[in-house]
Image (cartoon, grey):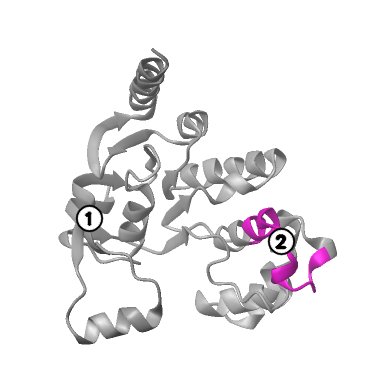
Amino acid sequence: MSTVVKVDDVSMMFNLSSEKIDSIKEYFVKAIRHELHYQEFWALKNVSFELEKGDSIGIIGLNGSGKSTLLKVVSGILKPTKGKVETTGYIAPLIELGAGFDANLSARENIYLNGAILGYDRAYMNERFDEIIEFAELQDFVDTAVKNFSSGMVARLGFAIATMNIPDILIIDEILAVGDYKFQEKSFSRMKKMIDSGATVVFVSHSIEQVKEICKKALWLEHGNVKMLGDAQTVCDCYMNEIGRASCRERV
């Protein structure tokens, strides 16, 4: 099997302001005077893993552990401070709710807009249009501005567009958590079919059961470090045991 994702010793550092700034004016004055002070924050530290064609990996960990940052690095949105990421093929990232949409445009217009961004012409999008709307369950809202959609409706439309074709790499960050249970199950079913067809999936979820159901592997992040990497069942069970022990200690 060929490697389609290789994350090699990746670290990601952000400069965070170490002082409170009350206004934009104050910020620029301090910047001009070179009076701004920052502290380094390492969101990821020496993260490494590889995925082959058809692999699926769940990224788990507490809030602030670096999960979303890792997905942005893998998808190419962020360039790592250290290390490198190599990917092969077309990436479909679903990382931020509504990313790629113009809120003032209708669902119809946003479908064609996203198609153009992805490199598809209007004729091709005409062929896929009904399928996208039907999967997203937005038949009654085709010409409604996206700004009037609920978060669940936006998530449904985004997922339907991103998965209208089978990408080489599908990256999903909690976006399906805002949808209803019925649509989540339909989406997971499509993801499983995509994996069976050779797509590689990188999936972040706070639902450990979802990770076990969808993913073959799991990576547990803690404060930006890899705490554990292995098969999904083993890693998820260890993670839940750790969370359970921490919860018990807090109650004692």
Mark 2 residue type: Glu
Mark 1, mark 2: which one is toward the viewer? 1
Q: Quadrant of residue 158?
A: bottom right
Q: Nearer the viewer, residue 63 or 162?
A: 63
Mark 1 residue type: Phe
| Badge 2: residue crowd in 10 Å (few <14, some 14–19, many ≥20) | some
Task: Name the residue rendered at 32%, 52% in the picture.
Answer: 70
Q: Which residue is mark 2?
A: 131
Where in the figure is residue 74, as x and y percent of width and height? 32, 57
Q: Nearer the viewer, residue 226 or 55?
A: 226
Q: Which residue is mark 1?
A: 41
Report if residue 134 lies within the magenta region: no
Where in the figure is residue 193, as x and y percent of width and height? 55, 43
Q: Quadrant of residue 65?
A: top left
In this picture, residue 82 sits left or right of residue 134: left
Q: Which mark is residue 210?
A: none
Image quarter (top left, top right, bottom left or bottom right) of the C terminus: top left
**Which secondary structure dominates the residues rendered in magenta?**
helix
Q: Earlier in the sequence, mark 1 or mark 2?
A: 1
